[in-house]
Amino acid sequence: MKDFELMLAPMEDHTNSEFRELCYKKGADSTFTEMARTSALARGNKSTLEKIKIPNPIPTYIQIIGANEEELEKFLQSFKPSKGFLGFNLNLGCPSLNMVQKGLGCALIKRVTKVKKLVQIIKNHGYSVSIKLRLGANQFEKEKKSYLNLIREVDADFFIVHAKHGKEHSMSPADFNVYKECVDTNKIIIANGDITKPEQIDYLKSIGVKGAMIGRAAIDDPAIFNKLKQVKN
C-alpha cells in the first residue's frame, strides 16, 4: 500500500472490469470488485464467480459478503488468485434490509467474534484481508461506538470506514469527525464517503488517515482520482 492510497469503491452494477481499468488509468491506485455472496461462491454460481474475475492485471481487491465460516472455507479451497489480485475485503457496510435481516453487512459490526473468525479463515489461506464498515447499523450503534470496538479487536490489514451508519441514506453527509478516533486505534484507516476535493485529502492526510475510497463521484467523473492527486489527465 502507498503512503496515501486512492481506491475505487465496490459498487453494484458499476465496478466491472472495464470500469475498474478505466479508473485505474485515471489515477485510482487500487480497485474493488462488486460485492459477491460467499454462499454463491461456495456453490460455484457462475454469475457470482464472473463478478470476482480479474481479466486484466489491474490492482484489485475482491469484496465478499457472508457470515458462514464453512461456506467461506469451501470457496477458498478452490480459489485461484489471478494476476492483479491484492486480497479480500469483507463487507460490513451493506445497509440493505435484506442483508441486515440475514445478519450480514452492517449487522455484523457488533459481532466481533464472528468477524475475527472470518478474517482468520482468509489469513489461514495466506491472503490479505481488509474490512469495509459503517459506523454501526443505526444511530444507537454509532453512539455506542461499535465500529471502534471492531477496529480495535479485529486483526485486519486495513479498515475502510464509510462515515455513515446503516440507517443513513446516500444523501446524508459523512461524519468526518470519526476519522481521528479511528486513526487513534493505530490501525490503518481508509476514509469513505463524500470525498470530492483535494482539500479533504489534505485534511485526511494531516490526521493520519492512509487513503480515501471514492464511489459515486467516480461514476460521475472517472478522472476524479487524478484530480484529487492534482495530476492533469
Image: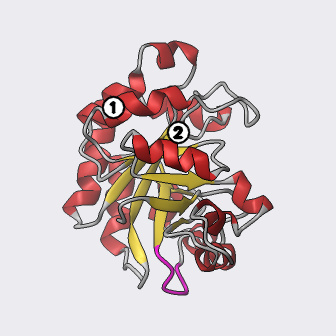
Give whichever of 8, 137 is nearer the camera. Answer: 8
The amino acid on which the numbered mark 2 sits, given as a three-letter code, is: Gly
What type of secondary structure mainly makes up the magenta span?
loop
Q: Is residue 181 visible?
A: yes
Q: Residues within 10 Å of mark 1 (few under 14, many from 20)?
A: many
Quarter of the view holding residue 101: top right
Q: Is residue 80 left or right of 103 when viewed as pictured?
A: left
Q: Residue at x 48, y 13 (%)?
A: 143
The amino acid on which the numbered mark 1 sits, given as a three-letter code, is: Leu
Q: Is residue 114 magenta?
A: no
Residue 89 vs 112, above or below: the answer is below
Q: Residue at x 67, y 75 (%)?
A: 232
* Residue 99 image position (x, y, % from top left): 59, 38
Q: Residue at x 57, y 57 (%)?
A: 35
The secondary element bearing badge 1 is classed as helix
* Residue 188 image position (x, y, % from top left): 32, 47
Residue 14 vs 130, above or below: the answer is below
The stretch in magenta equals 54-59
The secondary element bearing badge 2 is classed as helix
**Residue named by callout 2:** 105
Quarter of the view holding residue 155: top left
Q: How is the image coloured?
A: secondary structure
* Residue 11 image position (x, y, % from top left): 66, 56
Q: Is residue 26 left or right of 72 when viewed as pictured?
A: right
| Residue 150 tag number | 1
